[in-house]
Amino acid sequence: MQAVRKAAVILRDEATSLMPELLMDCKQIDWIYNPLEYAWAPHEEWIHRFAGNGAKTLLVGMNPGHGMGNTGVPFGCPEQVRDFLNITDLDVHQPPRTHPKRVVYGLDCPKPEVSGRRIWSFLSEHYQSPEAVSKDIYIVNHCPLWMFNDAGQNITPDKLTGPAANQLKVICNQHLRTVVTEMGITRVIGVGRYAQRQAAAVFNEIDVDWVPHPSPASPFANQNGGADWRAAFAEALRI
């Protein structure tokens, strides 16, 4: 869908333009990657193949981690992007500055992302094909930037303060509203409370729900071998 692609281009370019100010304003972060820049080819493929198939439910994550940081796909655990979504053989470049602990390997990255594996393996089991998923569900991140400190630790957007962080939230909210409007989304599900709060602040005319985050750092996500989280995810999706 061209409108969704255009919105992603605007988000990509505005977020990149804001990165120097974020690094000056926000003492919590020392490094910023923008996967919409260096992993644009697989992200564009994700939009092209899956944004126009009729989904009315939008899953909203917080910001990229290791998965999207390598693949350009929201919650894009590399193995799931290759084997289930069949997004392969596309160029992923390097950020302008690369932290030695956050090397970008691209679509061939051998390291899985647990959160993305949990989401996409559940969806693949239920829907059988990515096209079937995309008739019901589409996925975006609220913030496009992967950020960390000098030690290489992830810093999430909720930790940022200052004028540049406020401006980042404005452009992220505008992107989210455009996706919802252009796709005719009728229901938004935040993956984790932060994403839910951001979406709820943007929309009062549609349902905004939440599902616990599937991160391995979450005790709930690990309970009973992940079975409790899968049950909560199924309930949130109403499937």
Image (spheres, rainbow, N blue to C red):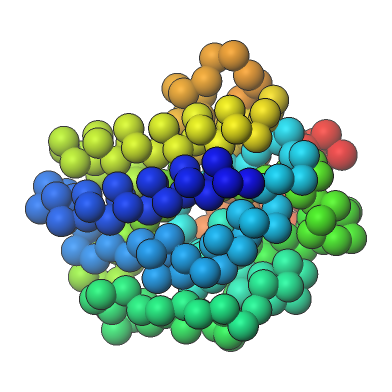
Count of picture labels: 0
Task: Locate residue 74 relative to residue 82 in the image: left or right.
Answer: left
Q: Residue at x 51, y 33 (%)?
A: 178
Of residue 228 and residue 200, the one placed in the foreground of this image is 200
Q: Is residue 223 visible?
A: no
Q: Is residue 183 left or right of residue 226?
A: left
Residue extending furthest toward the front: 2
Residue 112 position in % (x across, y down)? 60, 75
Look at 58% across and 28% down and name the residue there: 181
* x and y percentages locating residue 160 in the rendered image: 25, 44
Residue at left 29%, top 84%? 100
Q: Is residue 150 left or right of residue 210?
A: left
Residue 96 against residue 30 in the figure, above or below: below
| Residue at x 48%, y 46% (from the top left corner) | 6
Q: Is residue 143 visible?
A: yes
In the image, is 223 to the left or to the right of 215? Answer: right
Vertical order, 58 against 65 (above or below): above
Choose top left, top right, bottom left or bottom right for residue 117: bottom right
Q: Quadrant of the C terminus?
A: top right
Most extreme residue toward the left is 24
Residue 141 percent across, percent down from the top left: 50, 48
| Residue at the top extreme, as displayed | 205
- Expressed as whole percent of the image width and height from the top left, the position of residue 41 reads 52, 69
Q: With respect to residue 138, does 185 lie above or below?
A: above
